[in-house]
Structures are given as C-alpha cells and as structure tokens.
Image: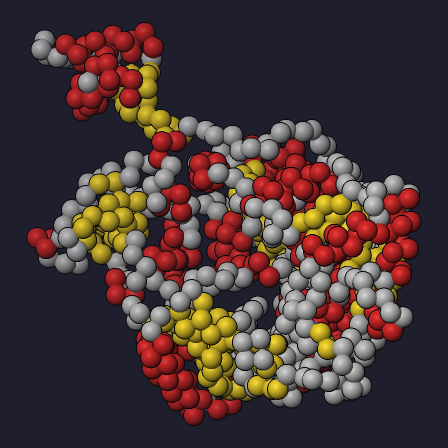
Amino acid sequence: MYAKVIVDIAHSQVDRIFEYSCRDDVKAGCRVRVPFGGRIIDGFVMGISESASFPPEKIKPVYSVYDEPPALVPECFALMEHIAERYRVPKAAALRLFVPSEMRLGKVHEAYVSYVVLKNPGVALPKSAKKQAEILQFLNTYGEFELSALAEKFGRGAVNALKDKGAVDIEKRRKRRNPAGAEEREESPKILTPAQSAAIENVESSPKTVHLIHGVTGSGKTEIYLNIIAREISRGKTAIFLVPEISLTPQMLAQLRARFKGEAAILHSGLSAGERFDEWWRLRSGEAKIAVGARSAIFAPLENLGAIIIDEEHDSSYVSESAPRYSTVDVASWRAAYNGCKLILGSATPSVESYLKAMEGEYNLITLPERINKKPLPEIIIADMRKEVRRGNNTAFSAAMRQQLNETLESGNQAIIFLNRRGYSQTVMCRDCGYVAKCENCDVTLTYHSEDNCLKCHYCGAKYRMLQACPQCGGRHIRYSGTGTQRVVADLKELFPSARILRMDNDTVSGKDGHYKILKKFAAHEADILVGTQMIAKGHDFPSVTLVGILDADMSLHFADYRSGERTFQLITQVSGRSGRAGSPGKVVLQTYCPENYILRFATAYDYKGFFENEREIRKATNFPPYSVICRIMVTSEDEKLAVAALKNVYFACGELKNRSPEEFIFLNRMHSPIKRIQGKYRYQVLMRLKTEKLLPEIYDIAVKNSTQSTLCYIEENPGNLS
Ligand code: ADP
Ligand code: ZN
C-alpha cells in the first residue's frame, strides 16, 4: 500500500504530494514521520492507495506513524485545497491550521496513557515465556493495566510478544486535563421573547445559507445563538461558535459551560497548551460537539456541522494578520456549503460589506431593533471639546463628563471610561476648530510621521508638509497626541479622591489572565470606575454600569483608513452598549472636537440604517470597498537592495496586468511602506485598488513568483492596517 503524504514544510518547492510505501496501520488523516532529503520529518497522510505512480522500487517506506487516531478528517483536505488555492499558500501551511501547534511541535505527548488490555487469556505460550505467562496472570486479576508500569515490571519485549500473539491489546487513552475556570454552574434556558423565537424560526425556514442577525446591543442575540446550537445538537449535529475575545468575557464562558457542560469545548488563549490540546481532542473524538473560540476555532475538527455562528461579525480580529491571511467568513462559508449547514453572522453594527450583501439579498437579514424587556438604549450626551478649550479647560474631562461621573458615583453605580487608542498620536488636528488634515487625492486622514516631520497618505503615498498653523482658522493649537490611560487615571484620582479606579490596557497587565482578573474585580463591584482602551468595548455585560464616558471619539474617526467612519460608528455603539443593561437606565458622554460630524450624529441616534446608506454612497462615489478591492503586495527583506529589486519586478508585472485589463484598475503605485523597517526587515509595497476580485489569482501568482528565501512577497486584501 502507498500513502500520499504532504510533508510538513511550508515551502512552494516541496508543495506536492509525495508517495511512501506503508503498512495498514497508516490511514488517511494520520500524521506520519517520513524520510525526506536525508532527514526524517513529519507529514500528513492525505490518502492511501493500492498502486503508486512511481516505480515501486524508488519509493521509500513511511518511517513511523504517530500513535494516535487520525488527526485530520476528509473535510480538512478539501478545505486545505480551497485555502491553498485561494490564498496561494503551500498545502502544508494550510494544513497546519487544522492541527494545534502544541501537537505539531510535539510538546504535549505525555497526555496519552497506554493501557494493556487482556484479550485472549487462553492463548498458548511456550514454556520458556515465563514473563509473558506472569503478565497474563497479572492481567487476569486486573483486567487491564498501564503499559508503562507493566513494561517496567515484566519488560516491554514480553508485552509486545503477547500483543503479537493476540493475547493482549494496547490501547491509547487520553489523560484529561480540566481547563481552569471550569466551575460548573446551573443555568436553565431563558424563556424566549417573541422576537427571539421569530429570529430562530426565520433562520430555520429561510433557504439561504448565510443569515445576518442585526440586533441592537442587549437585544438577546446570545440566547438566539445558544438555542440554534442546542437545536442542532439535538439533531445529532455539531456546531462552531466564534466570539472575538472569549477569554475577556467571563460571563459568556460561564454561560456556555452551564448550558452545554462537557458538550462544549472552549478554545481560548487563556488555556495552557495541554488544556487546549485536550479540548481539541475532545472535539476530534466526538466527545464534545460544540467548538467555541476565537478566529482559529473555525478550523475545529468537527464533522457533520449543523451551524456556524460568528458573533460580532464586524470585528477586525476575524481577519488573520499572518500567513495564510484568510478571512474567517470565507472559510466559514466554505464549511457551511460543504456541510450544507447554516452560517449565522451577528452584530449590533454589521460591517458595511455584510449589510450590503443582506440588502442585495445574498444574506438573509434578521433585525432585532429593541433591547430585551424594551429597556431603552442609553442616552448619549455630546460634549463639544472645542468649547471646553475656549473656556480654558485643558483637562481630559468635559464639564458634562464630570457631572455625570459625580452622579453615577453618588448613586453607587459604576462607570466605564473609554479611551480611543487607535490612530492615537498620529492624526493632526486643530484644537480650536476641529480641522483635520486630509489627503487631497484620497479623502482619508493623513498620518504624522515624526521621523521626517511630515504628513503622509497611507493609500497613495502622497507627502505633505507638517502644519504650523491651522489652514482653516489660523489657530496654533495643533495637536497630534491624545491622552494616555495613565494620565486619565491620575486626573480621575484628583477629581474623585474616594473613587476606586481600575485601569486596563496593554501596559497594565501582562497576559490575558491579568485582563480577566481586572474584569472579574470590576464585575464584583470592587471598583467604581474602569478606565481602558479598545479591549473594554466588546461584549461585557456589567449590570451596575450606568455611565460610559468616551474621551476622544474623534481619534478613530480620523484614523487613516477608509473604514474610520465605520470603525467609529461601531466603537461608539459597542461602548455605549455597555451602559444601562440591567437596573437603572444608562447614559453615555461622548467627547468630541467635531460634534457636527455625520458619523457621530448617526451613532448618537442609534441610526444604523442612516449610517449605512450614507457610508454606502461615499464608498460608491470614492471607489472604496465593498465597491472595489484594495490589494497590497508587501515586499520585505533584510537586504534593502533585494527588496527594491523585487519591488521593481512585482510592480512591473502588475503594470503588465494593468495594460492588459485597464478597466480593472482604479489605482496602482509602489512605495515605501509607512513603517519602513520592522524587525530588521525593509518594507516596500505595491498598492492597488481594483474594480473587482477578478485579477486576484494572477496578482497572488506575481507575489508567489517573486518570493525567495531572502525576500518575502505577500498579499493583503482590504488590509485593516496600512502601516
Ligand atoms: P446582545 O448579545 O444582543 O447584546 P445579550 O445576549 O447579552 O444581548 O442579552 C442582553 C441581556 O438580556 C442579558 O443580560 C441576557 O441575560 C438577557 N436576556 C436575553 N434573553 C432573555 C430572555 N429571553 N429573557 C430574559 N432575559 C434575557
Ligand atoms: Zn492619498
């Protein structure tokens, strides 16, 4: 027999299927070790066949098989082909997505325990086989025993001899580690509201594959997801449930464990390698039927999927930032089609792209316009920071913010102060009139580069002189730095000396565990105010929070990205959604230097449709996604000359494409990347805006062709970050 093997080397030169002869213990999906170029390396068995396509005498045998059930199911190989083709990565790189790295790197093997099980006690033994007879006697008493102990006592050879005779079997069993934080808690399912029931029925009865649930914050989307999952499980199916930051949302974890107990495997970054590995095997063995986790859980080893759910579908964490740069929705759509199952996307602020697909009828749109129990959405108070500056207030807090904080603390409730760090310190703004420097060609905000003291457009590479005074009002209060969390906490302590304050950002805590602890403390009301960045925006359900303060709503509005408007709308809606979820009605204070901005207007009115229609017009008129595709070919190398040479070739090849299909190109240029060097690698780029995805395969080919050992060329589609 012959095994078709993909060797675990992610390189285009060995991106083929190799044949090895094998025995029948090698099965499709197994991991094997094979001789390759004078070494022994790992490989994945794609399939087994009776005949080989090479002369048999030239074929080497498989060196050894990993002693474990086949890790990969047939769907993995089919999806591997799709990913390898779509994102032009070697098959091995695609396959690695399916296997926990702990397993590939051989870090957690000790978690297996082998048992020797008595099969045929009456087998005839020669007189000389004393040890074997002793083992049989021993097993007659115990039935089975750990292999390592038996081998130590009687010798491994004797055990093996018994196995060859069919007297005993050796069984591998998983030694289970219990994930931390798995405290069990009883929770009965809630009685669904009519809106929730209708949404579930709508998903069930619609013939479409993809469903977009657009429900305001607190509309009870989670309960809808859980019910859909429960129904699929009762039908004997499995499910994948993706959440952007599961490790940061303790309530969600507790809820899932309470509801599904051992049927859910929760893959989050807070787990140890061993725990993650065990959770993975629970899914693979069929013991667990629900995979819950962040982006990578889309590759969960489940068969017979009944539903895939992507919560907060607009979240940028769903696009992989390292190779293969897959889109989670793309992979999910593929798996949904393969399994004939439903894909449910949910959000209070769907991405413009998804909502457009819903409007055009590709997705089934389900709308939940009200919170559970008709609880009102929090009132949003706008504080005009230009007026504060004019009044001589140079602190980070407006009068409205101080007043609301005071009231919240006095009533014994909690507040969240949100600081927008995205784009922080890069945008140039006039504090007198709110003017923001923009590119003349691209209608996106310019970014300040301190190294050459100038302003740059990240979409076309245009360079502008740094402003000395505001071109609009002549003011000289030009700022390009926001306020840091540290400073905010210091100011708060001065304003409210008795308030207990927690701060959460990437500097305060190391590791996700630290975040979890801070959030738990806040949830237990051991603090009155939580100050933080992006990471406190999502998914939390703190019942006592009645005030959310947004210190600099503008910061992401002016981020140099065509999606800044969208991101700002999402952020304001999500952060506001943390306020007034239970008891008393909530409030939000939003500080801004441009209160008249339409995005802020739509956000404060909770007018998603208005925002969407407006945004869609802009994108259409300016030829930005989803009405075009932004494609960036990154060229990086430690050797600048090599990078420049490759850049030239890549640019030339793209130019040829453009000559052939000029109608597909809106923009094409090459330039330094905004950050010129990262980790010793020079960074150049070819930037394109294309009418459609039609030429993408050819563009991927260009990148692959120009990649060498020392120069890496890779593609980003609609990158979330152009640095
Ligand atoms: P979303 O995900 O849409 O923001 P959640 O799922 O967090 O909303 O629900 C908001 C709140 O409403 C939660 O506290 C949840 O426990 C509660 N809730 C959800 N469904 C019901 C229901 N059917 N009956 C009572 N409370 C519910
Ligand atoms: Zn520009």
Q: Horizontal placement of 434 versus 79: left or right?
A: right
Picture layout, residue 715 above or below residue 78: below
Q: Nearer the viewer, residue 409 or 322?
A: 409
Front residue of 438/68: it is 438
Q: Quadrant of residue 253?
A: top right
Applied colour scheme? secondary structure
Q: Position of residue 233 (x, y in %)?
A: 58, 40
Disc count in the image?
0
Residue in the foreground of this view, choosing between 421 and 431: 431
Q: Residue 73: percent from the left, percent from the top?
A: 39, 47
Look at 27% across and 48% down and name the residue there: 42
Image-based side of 215 in relation to 145, left or right: right
Relative vertical location of residue 632 with respect to residue 131 in this rendering, above or below: below
Residue 207 image-quadrant placement: bottom right
Q: Position of residue 512 (x, y in %)?
A: 58, 45
Q: Nearer the viewer, residue 74 or 184?
A: 184
- Residue drawn at the location 68% of the way across and 77% of the way down: 428
Residue ID at (18%, 13%)? 132
Q: Residue sitting at 47 percent across and 51 percent down?
A: 299
- Residue 275 visible to the viewer: yes
Could one spot residue 606 in this view of the protein? no
Q: In the picture provided, is 111 more to the left or to the right than 548?
A: left
Q: Residue 59's spot in the image, x, y percent? A: 13, 53
